[in-house]
Image (cartoon, rainbow, N blue to C red):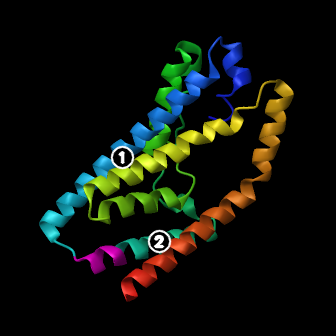
Amino acid sequence: MLSSIHPFGERSRNNSFASTAVAHVLGSVLGGAVLGMIAGAIGLAVTAFLSPSETVRTSIVLTAAVAALVLEATSRERLLPTRSRQVNENWIQSYRGWVYGGGFGAELGFGVSTIITTTLVHLMVVAMVFVGSFPLAVTIGATFGFVRGATVLAARNVDSPEGLRQFHQRLDGLRARSRSGAVASLAVASAVGVVGVVL
């Protein structure tokens, strides 16, 4: 979305970047919360039928974290389920900014309805199922949605074709750091999980 929603593009479509961006963030929070509701409901069902202990639930999330870490570190994240589609950019030409902003946000915030580029998303879903709390699962999903939706604000200063080109150059330069950050996050999650199981 960073290539489509920015002040330069919104101005060319006679839309307000502020309203489109706010709708995008709110839609993403909603999408994440819905994902949390679904995962939380599955978690309640698992708890009701299997009654796994806290240690078992923690061990499952830890195993998922270690598997995600290995796949991410070896660039094999595509072995996990993903989607082959991204949001429908034709909406940009058909609807008002707040409509496609909110729609794109909801799809991206839902996390699993578009291309999944990191194993952190898979791990988050596992964690929401086994966290043992429906409200907490929804909170995790909404927080994910907020963070993912707010990335659109990174393009808030793009107001010209040259600015857009430079912005994309900066993004390309961050690609390696992004992967390193994902691996580091998974390593921390695994370490915390080990401590949780041991203690």
Where does the magenta region start and end? 53-59
What whole-number distance in Å separates the C-alpha atoms at marks 1 and 2? 19 Å
Left or right: where does residue 165 sit relative to residue 123? right
- Which residue bears the numbered disc 1? 35
Residue 158 position within the rendered picture, expressed as x and y whole percent measured from the top left: 76, 30
Secondary structure at badge 2 equals helix
Q: Let me know if residue 116 appears in the view.
A: yes
Residue 39 position within the rendered picture, expressed as x and y whole percent measured from the top left: 31, 53
Q: Quadrant of the C terminus?
A: bottom left
Q: Of label 1 and label 2, which has the lower sequence position?
A: 1
Left or right: where does residue 23 sit relative to residue 169? left
Residue type at the position of mark 2: Ala
For label 1, count other residues whose C-alpha is less than 10 Å away and answer few (under 14), some (14-19) or many (20+): many
- Which residue bears the numbered disc 2? 65
Left or right: where does residue 31 sit relative to residue 43? right
Q: Main secondary structure of the magenta part?
A: helix
Who's the residue at 70% across and 32% down the image? 156
Q: Is residue 170 above or below residue 70?
A: above
Q: Is residue 121 above or below residue 54?
A: above
Left or right: where does residue 56 sit relative to residue 19? left
Residue 96 colored magenta? no
